[in-house]
Every structure is written in structure tokens, then in C-alpha cells.
Amino acid sequence: MARRRSIRTFSRDPVDRSLIESIVATAGTAPSGANKQPWRFVAIDDPDLKRQIREGAEEEERLFYQSRAGADWLRDLKAIGTDEHKPFLEDAPWLIVVFKMMKDDREGMPSDQVYYVNESVGIAVGMLLAAAQQAGLATLTHTPSPMKFLARILERPDYERPYMLIPIGWPAQDASVPDIERKRMEDIFVLNRGDLK
């Protein structure tokens, strides 16, 4: 898992649908508030839908880079080298759009209430990323904001809200990643109360 990195350059080589289904099935085993499982994973391999999603994402990203992001945010992103251009949304053989469900739409449930939605869906996404890594696939967590265009393009009901857009596939042969450092163990791990500074 230490080798998992976000990449933005994907091979166009196909990924079998059964592998994507297996990864989503793993994500579906995540714990959730009151076992409501408030997630929907929409997998897209249709080139026209991927083009529409890229166009929608790039429009939001243009606005982000031109006027929505503050100076600090733009400085932090500079080291990663991102901009409003998102070719990976068409190059990756699959896009998985994760929706958080604001009601339980299963028949026969005691109620349609959902609980701890963001936490539950976040855990499921983490498991999806780990399963993809174990399968040898590359991923990127992409969150254009706002993401309402995804629900419109994919014709999802109002109670399904876009949570994350994940391109997934094999990394391109020339794929590279930014030179970053992870926090040290002593920066992320505290035993008991730890040393208060």
C-alpha cells in the first residue's frame, strides 16, 4: 500500500469489467452508519459519457483556477502541477463516480433515513482505492467543485449526490508522479496522550 500514488496519465489499454465489479464489491463491504450502505458506484466506460464528464469537469476547474481558489491553495497545488486540463477523464478506461445517498431507497427497510453518510462513503472510497491498488490498477481521486454536473449527465435521482470522481486503469508507461514526501510516523501517530507541545 505504501506504493499507492495518484497518477494523471493512464494507458488506454482496456480493463475487464469483472475486475471493476470486484473492486466495487470490495468497497461495498465497508462499515456504515446503521448498516445503511449509503453509496452508489456508477462505472463509466462509454467514450461519449467520458467526454461529457471531462467537459463538465474542465468547465468547473477553469472557474476554480481563475477565481475560486485562494492564493495559498494555488501555491500548494503548484508543486503537484495540476491545472484545468483533465485528459485523464477520457484516457482512463473507466471512471467511477461515487455518489452519497441521502436516503435509503431499498424496499422493505424500516425507514429511509441514512446516518453518518460522509464518514461511511469515505470509508468505502478508501477500501475501493486499496482494492484497486491490490489489483495493480492506478487511480486518482478527483473532486471538481461543484459536482452537480455529474448527477445531470448520469441521470441520477436528486437524493444521490456526487461525492468523488475516480479515473481507474493501468498507468501509462511514461506515467510520473510529483516528488512528494509523506509525513513521518511521529507526525501522524500518538500513543495515549502523547507529548503535548
Image (tube, grey):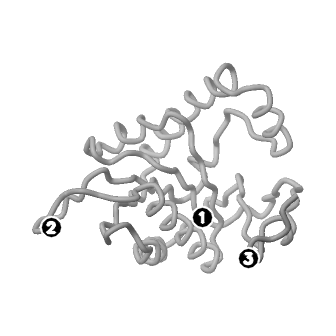
* Rendered view: 133 above or below 66: below
Q: Name the residue under label 3.
A: 192
| Label 3 secondary element | loop
- The local crowd at label 3, few if under 14, some if 14 to 19, many if 20 or more residues have their Cα within 10 Å, is few
Q: Mark 1 points at which residue?
A: 169
Q: Which residue lies furthest to the left in this view?
A: 108
Q: Which residue is drawn at 78% across and 66% down?
A: 188
Task: Answer with mark 1 or mark 2, whichever residue precedes in sequence.
Answer: 2
Q: Mark 2 points at which residue?
A: 109
* Rendered view: 132 above or below 175: below
Residue 112 sits in which quadrant?
A: bottom left
Calculate the distance from the C-alpha at mark 1 to the C-alpha at mark 3. Answer: 40 Å
In this rendering, the label closer to the viewer, 3 or 2: 3
Q: Position of residue 122 (x, y in %)?
A: 51, 60
Q: In this view, does 181 lie to the left or right of 19?
A: right
Q: Position of residue 117 (x, y in %)?
A: 40, 56
Image quarter where the C terminus lies is: bottom right
Calculate the distance from the C-alpha at mark 3 to the C-alpha at mark 2. Answer: 40 Å
What amino acid is found at the position of numbered circle 1 in the picture? Answer: Gly
Q: Position of residue 169 (x, y in %)?
A: 60, 64
> Exactly how many numbered labels are in the figure?
3
| Label 1 secondary element | strand
Task: Answer with mark 3 or mark 2, whichever residue precedes in sequence.
Answer: 2
